Amino acid sequence: MRAGSETVLKETTDYDALYRDFHWDVPERFNIATVACDRYADGAELLALIYVDEDRGTRKLSFDEVAAYSRRFANALKADGLRRGDRVAVFLSQSIELPVAHLAAFRSGMVSVPLFTLFGEDALEFRLNNSGARAIVTDLGGWEKLKKIRDRLPALEVIYVIAATAPVGTTSFWAALERASDDFAIVDTSCDDPAIIIYTSGTTGNPKGALHAHRVLLGHLPNVEMVHGFFPKPGDVYWTPADWAWIGGLFDALFPAWYHGVPVVGYRAKKFEPEAAMQLMADHGVRNVFLPPTALKLMRQANVKHPGVKLRSILTGGESLGAELLDWVRKTFGIDAHEIYGQTECNLVVGNNAALFPIRPGSMGKPTPGFDVRIVNEQGEELPRGQRGIVGVRQPNPCTMLGYWQNEEGTAKKYAGDFLLTGDLGIQDDDGYFWYVAREDDVITSAGYRIGPSEIEHTLLKHPAVALSAVIGIPDPIRTEAVKAWIVLRPGFAPSDALARELQDFVKSQLAAHEYPRHVAFAESLPMTATGKVLRRELRARG
């Protein structure tokens, strides 16, 4: 640990005192690039990133190098006409260039927009147009998707591609950096100035862009420190297979680690492979991980073991692990997996730490210091312990979004009384533990991703064979839920396995590979309300 990497929690075994005595300290002027990079770029070459490519080649970067690269890219953005407040999309997987692009946007007073590399054309087009992104950073794989919709993106002016020779109509990312100076005066930002838009899926309408301020990083620190056994400790090294396009990868892992001057391992894997994950952790001395439940399930299925893996802490979240998986983690790694709960709009509000209170299998844990979490009704009124209701988070706190981007109506619906309504149903027991019951809406949780059925349904309707579609989640032993599509065909089309595969491939190409329906069923009609809304609960009952 370095000077300046102060923790927000003091180590203790007394949860009640830790929770009671915590107070937020959010400075008025604050910029993520300063605290998560620049303060460690002091010439000492402190290790920031251990990047492992697909061929297992390794490159190490210091905070000094990351800071210099991001200052150069900030100058490149400025030279290309971008100004404070403009949106810069980052369409990359774990890589060296991804944090450089985000940090350049932060230090310029611009707003970054992370985009998942598995997104297809429809998903990309909506998010880029909705955010009004004027620039995007991607690789050649991303450019192949972008060029098909380029003429439908009127706001997008500059496309930076990570390639030795940039395709026609694009700019080489590294060539732009080489031309630029590494002297850049960081823009003075307040803690409440916009920093990042992270799109989240819902069940109705299009995805919503959660606009977060620079303070969002501070809002994540109490939970990260608590769940990771009072992170950081000397020798800590952090890794997650979670994509750095989501709030989990960026703010449960990358930027909190860098806030504390802790090196992060980045690994561009095409898919999660349990044995490769164990070898990676052993090779690079990983001590702290964020492993989604699906990753843990796959590791258990493969019965992985490696004497060189010596983890100190495991954060997990997205769905409950259950007693069996918790026991397997304990036997395999010698430590407890600490579950967390949160969402893109207000993340990491509940968590676990076995040194503070006993872990109860199936429970999400207890409120994170700094967050007042209650079970409330739709009016934001607190309900008695043991009664089912909506998980609500009292406002304000630094982790909560500024609002949905260009969606005042959606933002207003997210609040009731003093509470942000998560939309998830839960129970708080007499001892203060929170228990997840169900989604208030129909969001599908699959392999750690929260998938909105509406976007998939809209894409399916673009296929000439589809008259009506409804998408639900069905139980899956590995993914928690798998996406299933119910299809009513247009006249002239007949159900077949070949057509089912064609529809699956259509969604993969148009939307995203993780959102395609793994199961397709054909029906003569769909159950609907009198107002024409599909009764998904009836479809779920069919299985």
Image (tube, grey):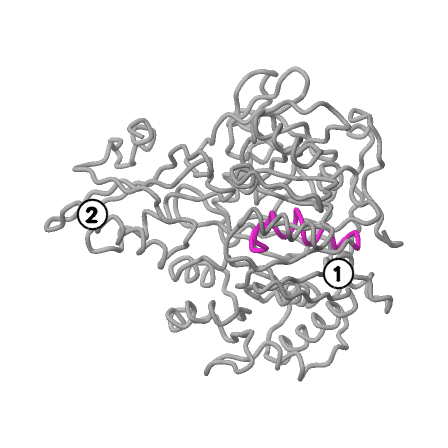
215 is higher (above) or lower (below) than 166? above
Q: From where the camera sits, is residue 252 visible?
A: yes
Q: Tag 1's secondary structure?
A: strand
| Residue denoted by label 2 | 467
| Within-10-Å neighbours for mark 1: few <14, some 14–19, many 20+ | many
Q: In which quarter of the view is residue 43 placed?
A: bottom right
Q: Image quadrant for the C terminus?
A: top left
Q: Nearer the viewer, mark 1 or mark 2?
A: 1
Task: Please name the residue shown 71% across and 55% down the image.
Answer: 284
Q: Nearer the viewer, residue 480 or 80?
A: 480
Q: Main secondary structure of the magenta part?
A: helix
* Horizontal and vertical percent position of residue 183: 77, 77
Q: Are marks 1 and 2 in contact (CB under 8 Å)?
A: no
Residues drawn in magenta: 241-261
Q: Secondary structure at mark 2?
A: strand
Let me know if residue 150 is in the magenta part. no
Q: Position of residue 513 (x, y in %)?
A: 41, 53
Residue 219 appears anywhere in the view: no
Q: Mark on residue 391?
A: none
Instruction: Name the disc covering residue 48, or none.
Output: 1
* Amino acid on which disc 1 is placed: Ala
Give the residue drawn at x 66%, y 34%. Answer: 337
Does residue 155 lie above or below 443 as drawn?
below
Q: Is residue 347 left or right of residue 531?
A: right
In three-dimensional space, the C-alpha distance between marks 1 and 2, rounded to whole angstroms, equals: 52 Å
26 vs 480, nearest the viewer: 480
